[in-house]
Amino acid sequence: MLDLWYKNAVIYCLDVETFMDASGDGVGDFRGLTHRLDHIEGLGATAVWLNPFYPTPNRDNGYDITDFYGIDPRLGNAGDFVSFARAAADRGLKVIVDLVVNHCSIDHPWFQSARSDPGSPYRDWFVWSKEKPEDITEGVIFPGVQEAVWTWDEQAGAWYMHRFYAHQADFNIANPAVREEILKIMGYWLELGVWGFRIDAVPFLIEYKGLDEEPDRDPLLLLSEMRDFLSWRRAGAIMLAEANIEREKAPDYFGGREFGADERMHLILDFPLNQKIFLALARGKAAPIVDALGTRPKDAPRQAQWATFLRNHDELSLDKLPDDERQEVFAAFGPDEEMQLYGRGLRRRLAPMLGDTDRVALAQSLLFALPGTPVMWYGDEIGQGEDLSLSERSAVRTPMQWADEHRGGFSRADCEPVRPLVEDGPFGFHETSVAAQRGRPGSLLTRVQHMIRARRACPEIGWGEVEVIEDLPEAVLGLVSSWRGARVLTLHNLSDAPVTCAPEIAGASHLVALLGGPDEAGHNPLAPGEEIALPKYGYRWFRIDGERA
């Protein structure tokens, strides 16, 4: 069997600079992260995805990079990274890092060379125009903040393209030297113990926008070459695509199913499902989630996998929802203008949006029960708070809340930390922290640990086929995941009222409880057709046993 470890993985995403400060300067670092790996291991995660940690002017949370082969000195050095990678491996945790190769900082030596001399070997590494492009605002990613996608550079005497902020110049992937450098970067980090890459802004990475002439070469070939290189250098290493794309484009990103066809991404973050989850939570009805699952392409390659998530380091994008549905989600979870961003999303953490702890736990259970590989955002396992006084997406990037003590246990520094900690209210560190919830029955952290334990014991969810159970109350999402003759039933009540249901499961002799109810430990199996009670925002997981011999 292929080593598709990611099919049953649980990925924990974090930002090194806001996770744990060991040096006492107010900035998280690799030594601090290494000391806190026990928390991630104890949670049950199997992989750690790191936001960018490279040298940077830090105008965009590290996504503006000045050295793809280095470590931001605030966070440590290469030795600290290797020590972290080794410690993670000792705990059975695979390391995934952000690969940000759509662009670099304009402070990068490559761009500095390119702008200073038309004859520079790096000039053609970027996308230039001598004349002002016709519509420099077409395709703006951050409306209201970003002014254009082209900027005039006085030193270069030309316009350069940037899909994102003006301080992030786009690479020209039509240039073979750029494509070769991307593989070189991947190879470097693979040698340092990395097991995969979350590839940033994939739709913009594989485009020829802004070039005077489009090459005959299919831009998707870059993904094929990256996949081939990965296979040669480290068997089992993966690529996770950040690609907020329409469903019909997914096969191009995953690659062909036929033997010998190009294989590309192992995983794609499922943005359409993510947006429908929050519509379903806003309505208290399961239908939007059912609709999103139904639109996933059926004929995907064997290695292909969707990555499911609730929140991440960016805004909660609702761009794939029609205007009326987007307004529903805004009204439910971000009615104030300061909670909204770019006209399409919410800059909020999970717990403050959902409020009720049982509702937060329901959402977490959904994350682990939906078909795909679950990806968690640090702090959501405890219901961490947000800081709307911070600009743009920084509201959800506050330091980890470890304890009700100085700087929330994040740092012993007397100086101000890299970002303010959330202090006030029920989601601040005085009331919400790892220390306050660790080992406490019924706490969100304890419940999430139980969920992850159940998810890892149910490979049917990651590997198998999923069937939606029909004729349930409209608030209830019922899924049966099947793989190699084994089946798992999950039920989720998305409403704030208790419901009962009696799902019809063909060939079932009884249901053995796994999670979420009074018989969670596995006692008192239920007979077929027996009514199952779900409290408000309740969830139940069962293993389906067939007819007894």
Image: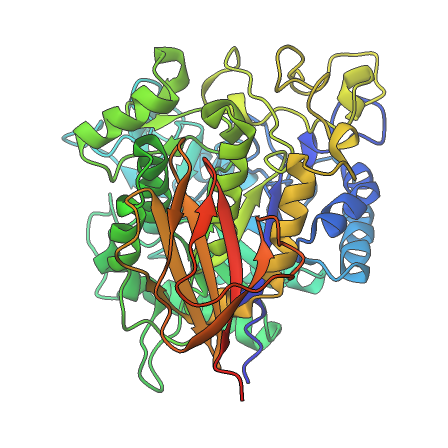
Note whether residue 473 is visible: yes
Q: Please give left or right for residue 342 compared with residue 413 in the image.
A: left
Image location of residue 391, percent across then percent down: 48, 16
Image location of residue 324, percent across then percent down: 18, 28
Q: Residue at x 31, y 36 (%)?
A: 279
Image location of residue 44, percent across then percent down: 69, 53
Q: Quadrant of the N terminus?
A: bottom right
Where 29 sits versus 247, above or below? above
User: Residue 103's image quarter?
Assistant: top left
Q: Quadrant of the C terminus?
A: bottom right
Q: Looking at the image, which is closer to me, 77 or 172?
A: 77
Q: Residue at x 71, y 61 (%)?
A: 193
Q: Looking at the image, which is closer to me, 166 or 86?
A: 86
Q: Residue at x 36, y 74 (%)?
A: 506
Where 101 sits versus 3, above or below? above
Image location of residue 167, percent across then percent down: 45, 28
Q: Looking at the image, which is closer to me, 188 or 437?
A: 437
User: Residue 505's image quarter?
Assistant: bottom left
